[in-house]
Amino acid sequence: MNSRELITRVIEFDRPARIGWDFGGGPSDLRGCGVRYDRTERLEEHRKWGYHEELLKQVPHFKGLVYEDEWGNIWGRLDGASKGEVVRGVLEDGFDRLGEIAFPHFVVEDIERLKEARERHADKFLMGGLPGFTFNIMRKMRRMENFLMDTLLAKDEITKLGAKIESMLAENISFYCDAGFDAILFGEDWGSQEALLISPPSWRELFAPSFRRLCGQAHEGGLKVMMHSCGNIAEIIPDLIEVGVDVLQLDQPGLFGLEYLSQYSGKVTFWSPVDIQKVMPTGNRELIEKTADDMMTYLGRGGGFIAKDYPQWDVLGVKPEWVKWAKDRFLAHSY
């Protein structure tokens, strides 16, 4: 059984030989590849971090490094390490500009690269990356604080903007279907440490329909749907399952509790490291190893669990030997 077959069985709860593995530096059953978006109007120098005078004039309140993304948003950061945040959204001043702005286009050369990736990683479970679903893109275009208010005060405008973005995402999904990929992967950070960022009824009204359509398209094309989210999204886990999400990538399973998540065993697969906030930073070997064991017990019943690394353990102060304790437990597991 190769990695592609194994992860498919894990997700389908079809008696895989072991849990899935996704570790930096190996072993890993997963591979990712994506299509880039770009804008003809974007100046070449604005594609990289720098002190760009033209961009800084648009954000006089900000004095750090900036760059312009493919949607026309200006990002800023104060050092060379952080990934930054949007300091001016392309639609920050209102939805009136929606008809004026140029949406990004796909880099055509990348479409052929998808087919090459499928051939090169024929034995791996191949994921096609998306820049989020509609929320992750819209909240940057409006900036988060504006967009959260929009969910109450500008529902019609959200629907119109969301439809345009959904159309782009649907086209992107079709590329992955045509190239024979196994899944789509997107990130949408829907939770704070305590709860969902908006009310569950608002999520169901404004976002569930789009989720359902995009997930349905992916499934019709033979793709699984994999979603990353930070924060506590317990209130909509049943909704995410219902609209078609097959895999939840959660870096903080401790926010929910493993026993709580186990109620969804057989319904959705969890793709997670040992909790990056409550467990790994403790450096407590007994706790780390026990948590790894518990994750396989509660989440990996006949499938349903992919163990993973976190890409920035050093930023969290987690030492390599602590990571190895968890990894060794996961690698030793079999059904």
Image (tube, rainbow, N blue to C red):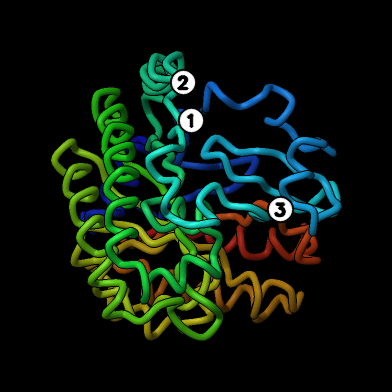
Mark 1 packing: few (<14 Cα in 10 Å), some, or many (20+)? Answer: some
User: Could you say whether the residue bearing mark 1 is in a helix, strand or loop?
Assistant: strand
Please tell me which residue lies in front, 274 or 205.
205
User: Could you say whether the residue bearing mark 3 is in a helix, strand or loop?
Assistant: loop
Do tag 3 and tag 1 residues touch (Cβ < 8 Å)? no
**Above or below for 255 versus 20:** below
Mark 3 packing: few (<14 Cα in 10 Å), some, or many (20+)? Answer: some
Q: Residue at x 46, y 83 (%)?
A: 195
Measured in 3D between alpha carbons, the distance from the residue under mark 3 to the one under mark 1, in whole angstroms, is 19 Å
- Which of the 4 image quarters holds residue 93? bottom right
| Res 84 label | 3
- Left or right of residue 310, residue 20 in this image: left
**Above or below for 138 versus 197:** above
Tell me residue 302's x, y (percent): 27, 63
Residue at the extreme left = 220
Please tell me which residue lies in front, 212 or 41.
41
Q: Which residue is mark 1?
A: 37
- Counting residues from the start of the chain, the first of labels 3 and 1 encountered is 1
Do tag 2 and tag 1 residues touch (Cβ < 8 Å)? yes
Q: Residue at x 35, y 81 (%)?
A: 199
Q: Which residue is mark 2?
A: 107
Mark 2 packing: few (<14 Cα in 10 Å), some, or many (20+)? Answer: few
* Amino acid on which disc 2 is placed: Val
